[in-house]
Amino acid sequence: MRRLAVVTVALGLTFGGSSVLAQEHASGEKKAGVEKEESFAEKHELELKWVNFLLLAGLIGYFIGKNAGPFFAARSAGIRKDMDESLRQRQEAEAKAADVDCRLANLEKDIAALRGQSETEAQAETERMAQQTEAEIAKIQAHAEQEIASAGKAARMALKRYSAELAMGLAEQKVRARMTPDNEDALVQGFVRNLKP
């Protein structure tokens, strides 16, 4: 590309110099009035325009070639990077969507499992409460039986005491009814005799 630019510049300088000569020559011939040379000057001028155009096109081509390659390479790299990023994001979105679909598919199973687990826990809690209630009832019954037994024992003791008091009272009444002053003297003398050795 550089060689093309150098060749184009060289041609431009060569034909540019001859353009000036041709213009002087053309003006001299015009003064002379030669028609043949006018057509030659016009032809030569057209050639110079083409050379100038080629020189300008070469310079533009050189600068485009120099700057366009890196520009388009950077642009291609940016596009490739954007495409890779969008592909990565698409794959992430598809993975998330697949995960959500999987969760939704398993949601019914999870709900059934949670229901089963809650039913099992509720049944276990009911059984535990029933066992605890039975244990409390057994404790209350045992305590009541102990209270009843204790109350019965106390009542029997009170009854025995009352019976003994009644028996003692009756015996005392009988003894007093049979006790006469003579019997009292005989008892006292017998007691005193037993005291003597």
Image: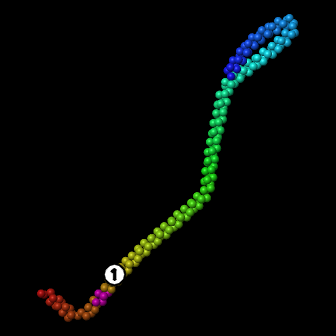
Q: Quadrant of the N terminus?
A: top right
**Residue at x 56% of width, y 63% of height:** 116
Q: Amino acid at mark 1?
A: Met
Q: Find out whether residue 167 is within the magenta segment.
A: yes
Find residue 29 and report its horizontal and vertical position in percent: 84, 7
Magenta-colored segment: predominant secondary structure: helix
Residues 173 and 9: in front is 9
Classify residue 147 as left or right of residue 175: right
Which residue is located at x 40 percent, y 78 percent?
148
The residue that label 1 is drawn on is 157
Task: Please name whichever residue, 59 or 176, is drawn nearer the observer in this view of the structure.
Answer: 59
Q: Position of residue 21 (x, y in %)?
A: 77, 9
**Residue 57 horizontal/vertical position (percent):** 74, 21
Q: Is-magenta flag for residue 28?
A: no
Name the foreground residue: 132 vs 175: 132
- Residue 48 in sight: yes
Q: The C terminus is located in which quarter?
A: bottom left
Mark 1: few, some, or many residues within 10 Å (few <14, many ≥20)? few
Residue 44 vs 180, above or below: the answer is above
Q: Position of residue 3 (x, y in %)?
A: 68, 20
Q: In terms of secondary structure, where does tag 1 sit? A: helix
State the residue at coordinates (66%, 32%): 75
Residue 40, picture quadrant: top right
User: What are the residue bounds of the magenta stretch?
Assistant: 166-171
Give the total number of marks visible in the rendering.
1
137 lies above or below 182: above
Left/right placement of residue 193 relative to residue 96 reads left
Residue sitting at 15 percent across and 88 percent down?
Answer: 194
